[in-house]
């Protein structure tokens, strides 16, 4: 249970504690896990003894400023280097304090957080309530599209009565505010590094108060050292970690085979996962051998979600008939019929057609000439985009050209975009942010009313109805349509572990989730 029932208690001005937001004591000192290479019999490649624990991925880090982190790659920095007042275990909606000792509703529109004692930035500066105020107001002011800043909309002012206390005054009762404070955009930043009026350059070395600090970066390789001054929800175990970006599944798989990585995070194609899983299964059955790469698979169920989204700048995006046609035509590729992934509270299935022969509403101006973009680093991205294009082409009402996004572009400029992204938290509000942020929607006024009155309600029935209605409006508008929800598979070297529950709230990579077995 994660939503707070305020009701009569608030009417009596009784302090109501956020679910899961309890007193937090300083965590015990983590065990030091020096990255000693695991010795395995041939033919398993032995990692080089002169390197630190290394994670390989095809996700690219394009921003080191939390307010501008809108992709999974960049959010690795948010969850490894920075911290927020609140967090949740990965894939759950149970709020937990991180930089805060506790957060409580003192009134329906007053949310107060008390910081842990002794917090310091990695620069050595104390973390105070003024820094939290600065960070949240900066995120609101810059308002980077696609960031979690949109979820901070209910905050009308922030008070700092003392260095340890932050008081959020809300413009309306918002029981989701704790989740907003768990998004990357709500990360606590050092004002000496992050200016108030602009996003810092991607080359700026990040400075936070999280479990790791960046010690070096360049050429797609990021080196991290455990921050010994960290206090919070998820302390790091491994002393030094390297994150290395690869430009393709083939390159990442080769790194596995060569013993150059100790763990993988995303990037492997379906075929590569099958190969590596088969090797691990076959070889681990023999008592005297280990998997060919020395890495074993760990499945994260239902954490990968693919969606199809319109570029609002497309000449077709404003045509409801064209949007409906594309949603219908994509039905034979669809296995997820809810805009919310299964497992998110309130997911409403059956709103989008799936399978069979699509009942197409023919839009005017056919055949349509559409472009479909995708991230070339996305696992199987080219194949998935091509399959989707064939489905649209097969209707005879459209011709689709598949175009990879330009390097460094998050979404590209094509009419349609195949999205492989994570929401900032595992909540309905976060997953509905993209489809409900489109201006000009026929339901725009009703959506705004529900977002400020129904969705943040402490009454469970009202909240549930709001989530359902928002999904219906989003499905009817069809700016964003679901395609699939599948498992992620990560590989970890023998002798090491990954605690998947300690990943970011929306299944983002947090390097503190890895540890060395005792």
Image (cartoon, rainbow, N blue to C red):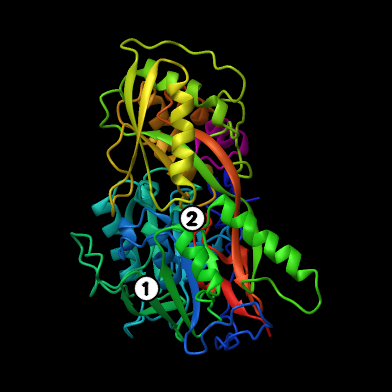
The magenta-colored residue range is 453-467
**Farthest-out residue, front:** 43
Residue in view at x 67 percent, y 83 percent: 40
Residue 93 visible in the current orientation: no
For this view, does 398 lie left or right of residue 11?
Answer: left
Q: Is residue 121 above or below residue 336?
A: below
Q: Is residue 432 above or below residue 408?
A: above
Q: Quadrant of the C terminus?
A: bottom right
Q: For numbered disc 2, what is the local secondary structure?
A: helix
Q: Is residue 327 above or below residue 174?
A: above
Rounded to the nearest angstrom, the CA distance separating label 2 from label 1 is: 33 Å
Q: Position of residue 122 (x, y in %)?
A: 36, 81
**Does the segment drawn in magenta span residue 463?**
yes
For this view, does 376 lie left or right of residue 257?
Answer: left
Q: Between disc 2 and disc 1, whose residue precedes?
A: 2
- Classified by dominant secondary structure, the portion drawn in magenta counts as helix
Q: Position of residue 14 (x, y in %)?
A: 56, 55
The residue labelled by disc 1 is 221
Residue in view at x 51 percent, y 61 percent: 504
The residue labelled by disc 2 is 178
For this view, does 310 lie left or right of residue 86?
Answer: left
Q: Residues within 10 Å of mark 1 (few under 14, many from 20)?
A: some
Q: Nearer the viewer, residue 222 or 135?
A: 222
Q: For numbered disc 1, what is the local secondary structure?
A: strand
């Amino acid at each position: 249970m994660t939503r707070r029932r305020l009701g009569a208690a608030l009417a009596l001005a009784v302090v109501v504690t956020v679910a899961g937001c309890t007193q937090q004591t300083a965590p015990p000192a983590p065990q030091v896990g020096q990255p000693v290479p695991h010795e395995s019999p041939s033919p398993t490649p032995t990692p080089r003894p002169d390197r630190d624990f290394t994670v390989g991925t095809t996700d690219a880090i394009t921003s080191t400023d939390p307010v501008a982190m809108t992709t999974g790659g960049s959010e690795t920095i948010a969850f490894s280097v920075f911290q927020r007042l609140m967090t949740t275990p990965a894939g759950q909606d149970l709020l937990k304090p991180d930089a805060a000792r506790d957060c409580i509703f003192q009134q329906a529109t007053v949310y107060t957080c008390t910081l842990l004692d002794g917090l310091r930035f990695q620069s050595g500066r104390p973390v105070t309530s003024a820094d939290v105020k600065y960070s949240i107001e900066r995120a609101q002011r810059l308002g980077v599209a696609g960031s979690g800043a949109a979820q901070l909309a209910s905050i009308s002012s922030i008070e700092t009565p003392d260095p340890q206390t932050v008081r959020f005054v809300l413009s309306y009762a918002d029981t989701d505010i704790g989740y907003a404070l768990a998004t990357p955009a709500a990360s606590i930043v050092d004002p000496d590094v992050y200016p108030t009026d602009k996003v810092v350059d991607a080359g700026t070395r990040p400075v936070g108060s999280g479990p790791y600090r960046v010690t070096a970066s360049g050429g797609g390789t990021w080196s991290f050292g455990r921050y010994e001054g960290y206090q919070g929800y998820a302390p790091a175990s491994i002393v030094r970690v390297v994150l290395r970006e690869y430009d393709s599944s083939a390159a990442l798989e080769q790194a596995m085979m060569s013993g150059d990585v100790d763990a993988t995070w995303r990037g492997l194609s379906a075929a590569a996962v099958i190969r590596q899983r088969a090797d691990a299964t076959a070889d681990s059955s023999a008592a005297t051998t280990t998997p060919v790469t020395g890495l074993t698979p760990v499945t994260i169920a239902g954490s990968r979600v693919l969606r199809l989204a319109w570029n609002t700048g497309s000449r077709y995006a404003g045509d409801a008939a064209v949007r409906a046609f594309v949603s219908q035509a994509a039905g034979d590729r669809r296995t997820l019929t809810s805009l919310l992934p299964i497992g998110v509270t309130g997911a409403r299935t059956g709103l989008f057609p799936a399978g069979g022969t699509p009942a197409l509403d023919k839009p005017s101006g056919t055949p349509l000439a559409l472009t479909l973009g995708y991230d070339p680093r996305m696992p199987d991205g080219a194949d998935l985009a091509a399959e989707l294009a064939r489905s649209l082409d097969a209707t005879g009402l459209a011709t689709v050209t598949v175009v990879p996004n330009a390097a460094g572009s998050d979404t590209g400029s094509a009419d349609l975009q195949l999205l492989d992204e994570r929401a900032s938290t595992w909540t309905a509000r976060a997953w509905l942010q993209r489809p409900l942020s489109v201006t000009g929607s026929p339901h725009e006024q009703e959506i705004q009313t529900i977002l400020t009155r129904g969705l943040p309600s402490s009454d469970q029935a009202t909240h549930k109805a709001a989530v359902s209605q928002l999904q219906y409006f989003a499905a009817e508008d069809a700016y964003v349509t679901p395609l699939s929800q599948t498992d992620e598979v990560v590989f970890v070297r023998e002798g090491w572990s990954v605690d998947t529950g300690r990943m970011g709230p929306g299944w983002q990579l947090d390097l503190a989730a890895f540890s060395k077995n005792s």
